[in-house]
Image (cartoon, helix red, strand yellow):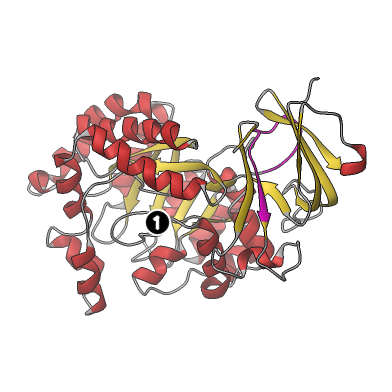
Amino acid sequence: MAIDLLVSGIDTLLTMDSDAGETALGVVPDGAVAFAAGRVAWVGPSAEAPPAREVRDGHGCIGMPGLVDCHTHAVWAGSRADEFRRRLAGERYSDILAAGGGILSTVRATRAATEEDLVADAARRLATMAAKGVTTVEVKSGYGLAPEAEARLLRAARAAGELAGVRVVTTFLGAHAVPAEHRADRAGYLREVIEVQLPACAPFADYVDVYVDEGAFTVEEGRAVLESGRRHGLLPRIHAEQVAATGAAAMAASLGASSADHLERVDAAGIAAMAAAGTVAVLLPGAMLYLRDAAPPVAALREAGVPLAVATDLNPGTSPVADLWACATLACVTMGLTVEEALLGITRNAARALGRHDLGRLRPGAAGDFVLVRPPAGEPPEAAPLVQFLGALEVALRVHEGKAT
């Protein structure tokens, strides 16, 4: 096989592809990675590397798979800065939402924006993430809450990914909130989501999600949406247990959900169900901090063997954070993750949350996504500094689909 690109002399290569335990990073000292036809072709010691048409030097750096941000709402219009002031004054998000703010405020602004503007704004956000070594971003709809408006968001997400040079995977989230025009007919809106929005949006989506919580949708409503999404070929995921313990995580796990996200108030039954189903816990420290919430029960999740992922939850109101490195660090500081868990949480386990085992690890046949990171001056080229500095890292090289940028 002809090798297109070889990155060699990497001081510490973290393949995230190890059988030595759930927190092993698959370390290869003085490692190298070769790419061909857009995929990883070879991984190993630099001394054994194959010849290549293009060679890049990784000396003084840490190499690892391209980062995966597995939970974002990166396509929106408008601002929610006023809501930030209200929350600082002590107002609860669920009360803001009930009064027509929160998600509903963003829905009004997003519906009024053109698709071209949505694409351009989202592309700039995704480009910021790409500059930090992110190669895959999950993007949800949920700010249209009407058939064509939801489909437009999913199309915009994919178009923005092409402009920004990142792989975008899309999630239909029509059950994000009940829009203002349906407040008097909640059951009617749920029927629209299942019978009209899902068929219109499924061609542009990879996953189906639903926000089940206090002030949002009920467990049974969520079940109906996820089951319908599965019939359309979409993999279930869920916003669960953020505001109140509802049983949403256990319900989603019973349907084979690839992830349950937030989980600040998940209970023992939910954790056990997730562990049995292999459902990934996606932790969102940006939202936890902005909402001044309690941390999820990470120790209990860990003890049960639930895989842990970390994402930005990039959105205009409750987590306007586009730096996945910073979120990895915050997950350690505020939630109790180890360095190893945080690094796996933004690579292999984040990919697992998306049901994508070809991402987030370096092994032959995997997607050709890779990032070469230079730690801050004076720090050793090993794993620990990567999550210590709240994103103050230099990305020396980013490889996406086998092409260096």
Left or right of 367 on screen, residue 19: right
Using the rendered image of the protein, determine whether residue 220 is visible from the camera's viewpoint.
Answer: yes
Which residue is label 1 attached to? 240
Left or right of 130 on screen, residue 118: left
Instruction: Find residue 339 and report its horizontal and vertical position in percent.
Output: 66, 66
392 in relation to 61, above or below: below
Left or right of 100 on screen, residue 122: right
Image quadrant holding the C terminus, namely: top right
Where residue 242 sits, quadrant-wise, is bottom left
Residue that sits furthest to the right in the current view: 47
Image quadrant holding the N terminus, namely: top right
Residue that sits furthest to the bottom in the current view: 89
- What kind of secondary structure does the magenta stretch mostly adopt? loop
Residue, x 36% and y 75% (percent of image)? 292
Determine the secondary structure under disc 1.
strand
48 in relation to 322, above or below: above
Residue that sits furthest to the top in the current view: 1
Does 372 lie within the magenta span? yes
Instruction: Find residue 237 and report its horizontal and vertical position in percent.
Output: 44, 44
254 in relation to 343, above or below: above
Instruction: Find residue 328 and report its horizontal and vertical position in percent.
Output: 56, 62
- Magenta residue span: 361-373
**Looking at this view, is 208 or 11 the one in front?**
11
Residue, x 58% and y 43% (percent of image)? 351
**Looking at this view, is 9 or 187 the one in front?**
9
Residue type at the position of mark 1: Ala
